[in-house]
Structure formats: structure tokens, C-alpha cells
Image: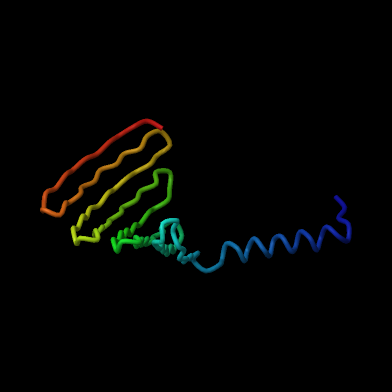
Amino acid sequence: MRFSATTVPVRLCLAVLGLVATAGVAPAAEWTRGTVHGGQLSRHVTGDGLVYSGQTTRVGPNGGTYTSSATCLNGVVDRCRRSYTAIGPAGRTYSGERASARGPFRVRSVGRITGPDGGVAVGGHRRWR
């Protein structure tokens, strides 16, 4: 097998880029943008190997806020746990949490939500993909 003078540096460069990409720092992203109706949306996501987490905050033009944080584990079955809180402009608060697992053949999810009067609703589903 013969290598030309140009293929050796190209292959060496690709090998070095591959090593640098796999040994890099944990990926992170953070951004904020305005919404169509005058609100604001912010997101922060970090990852460490197979585990990643993030937080999302949305502030509406009328003062209502929604905050969600999640942690997920990637694998053959992806597992996520998310908690959220929403506060309306009149001060009414809703909160809840949801856990889900997504495999190659089906998705399972269960969660609960608490309303402003303290009432709790629990629900879940399982469906084929």
C-alpha cells in the first residue's frame, strides 16, 4: 500500500482532530432570545458523558413565568426526569414533575401536577414507537 505525500498529513490531521474532539470539555450551551409576543426565553444545557441537564425559563409579556429543569441519561433506554413551575400574572402557581423512559420499541412516562388550590393530578402512559 502506497501513500502519497498529501494523504499522510491529511490522515494525521483527521486523527488528531478525532482525539481532540473526544477528549474535549463537557459540552455546554446557553442562550436567551425574545419571543414573538414580547416575552423572553432562556436556556442553559450542560453535558458530561452520557448525562446531560438543562434549565429553561420563559417570561411572558404579561409577567407570567415558566421554569423547567431536567436531567437525562442517554443509553439504549434514554431516561429523563423533569420538574417545572409556572406562575401566572395573577400569582397562581402550578408545579409538577415527570419521569420518562424511551427505548427502541416503546415510551413510558409518568408525572404529577399540583394546581394553585393544592389539588394533585397523576397520570402516565405507555405506547409503542
Q: Position of residue 125 (x, y in %)?
A: 27, 36
Q: Quadrant of residue 103?
A: top left
Q: Quadrant of residue 36?
A: bottom left
Q: Is residue 17 left or right of residue 47?
A: right
Task: Determine the residue positioned at 18% across, 43% down.
Answer: 122
Which quadrant is home to the C terminus?
top left
Q: Quadrant of residue 85?
A: bottom left
The outermost residue toward the top is 128
Q: Is residue 67 left or right of residue 12?
A: left
Closer to the camera, 4 or 93? 93
- Residue 123, above or below 73: above
Q: Position of residue 68 (x, y in %)?
A: 32, 58
Q: Position of residue 110 (x, y in %)?
A: 25, 43
Q: Position of residue 60 (x, y in %)?
A: 34, 60
Closer to the camera, 111 or 1? 111
Task: Determine the residue positioned at 56% across, 66% down.
Answer: 23
